[in-house]
Image (spheres, rainbow, N blue to C red):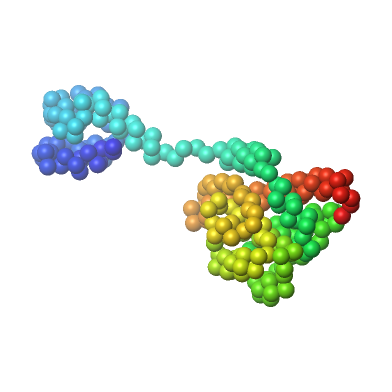
Amino acid sequence: MRLEELVNRYQGELNPTDLMIWKYIYNNKDECENLSIYELAKACNVSRTTIMRFAQKLSLDGFSELKAILKMEKRDNFPEKVDEVEILSELYQRITKNLVKKNFDTVNRLIYQADRIIAYGSGFVQDNVVIELKRLFLGSGKLICDLKGNSELGILVEHLSEKDLVIIVSFSGESSQVVKMARELHLRGIPVISITKLKDNTLASLSTENIYISSSQFSLYANEKIPPYESMIGYYMVIEMLFIKYEVYRREQSVLYGAK
């Protein structure tokens, strides 16, 4: 507990001399951190015993505990140094580990069996992820149609069937348009694969299969008005791993049942 909180809690037990001592400590915390009890008593023009009683009135064992709290407060006032490069390195390792372990069988089967694949990104970055997804799958013979606007998908939904597949890339999985779209697809029995940042979201709950992205945020800019930096690399790592695992799956299917 901070000294200010202790003073407020036990203020009724403090006399004017105690409050004078507190005022001196409050205005000279850095100095008091290194003073002996005798030096603080001299600075406040009181006795050593008075300083000791002041500390005890705050429920402290004595002056040494008061100084320990001062040092702790000073340490807490300095933000912990953040190693941004290390944070990103750990993020990459965590994403890779999770993707290697994830079973993509259902996702691969949905893609393999789909007559048509429609992909939609709910924002600028998400659109770029969809474009890269489309590029990757060209080599596998799967043409992914990427939609640029909400209205296009709204119209297209009416012409989709259970043999088609929709892939939705979203950050939160909670935007009103995305949720509305997912509900319509769910009601019509159209398979949906969602790629989202958060584990608990409405889009994921309405999807046939969902892929989650690990992310990390940290303050990077000197200007505090700029939002924290958040790496988007996880989305690109996911779709690349998805493509690689799908290619392995497709080759296995070709061996078992012939080329598709």
Question: Which residue is at a point 72% across and 73% down the rendered structure image?
Answer: 159
The answer to whether 188 appears left or right of 38 in the picture is: right
| Quarter assignment of residue 36 | top left
For this orientation, the residue located farthest to the right is 258
Residue 116, horizontal then vertical, whole percent:
78, 64
The answer to whether 56 appears left or right of 174 in the picture is: left
The residue closer to the viewer here, 208 or 233, is 208
| Quarter assignment of residue 166 | bottom right
* 71 shown above or below 222: above
User: The N terminus appears in which quarter of the rendering?
Assistant: top left
Residue 211, horizontal then vertical, whole percent:
64, 51
User: The C terminus appears in which quarter of the rendering?
Assistant: bottom right
For this orientation, the residue located farthest to the front is 257
The residue closer to the viewer here, 227 or 255, is 255
Q: For the image shown, how many numbered marks are present on the structure?
A: 0
* 15 shown above or below 149: above
Question: Which residue is at a point 59% across and 60% down the rendered structure image?
Answer: 206
* 88 shown above or below 127: above
The answer to whether 12 appears left or right of 248 in the picture is: left
Residue 87 at least partly seen:
yes
The residue closer to the viewer here, 82 or 30, is 82
Residue 221 at least partly seen:
no
Residue 64, horizontal then vertical, whole percent:
25, 25
Question: Which residue is at a point 55% across and 68% down the rendered structure image?
Answer: 176
The answer to whether 216 appears left or right of 139 in the picture is: left
* 201 shown above or below 54: below
Question: Which residue is at a point 79% across and 46% down the rendered structure image?
Answer: 249
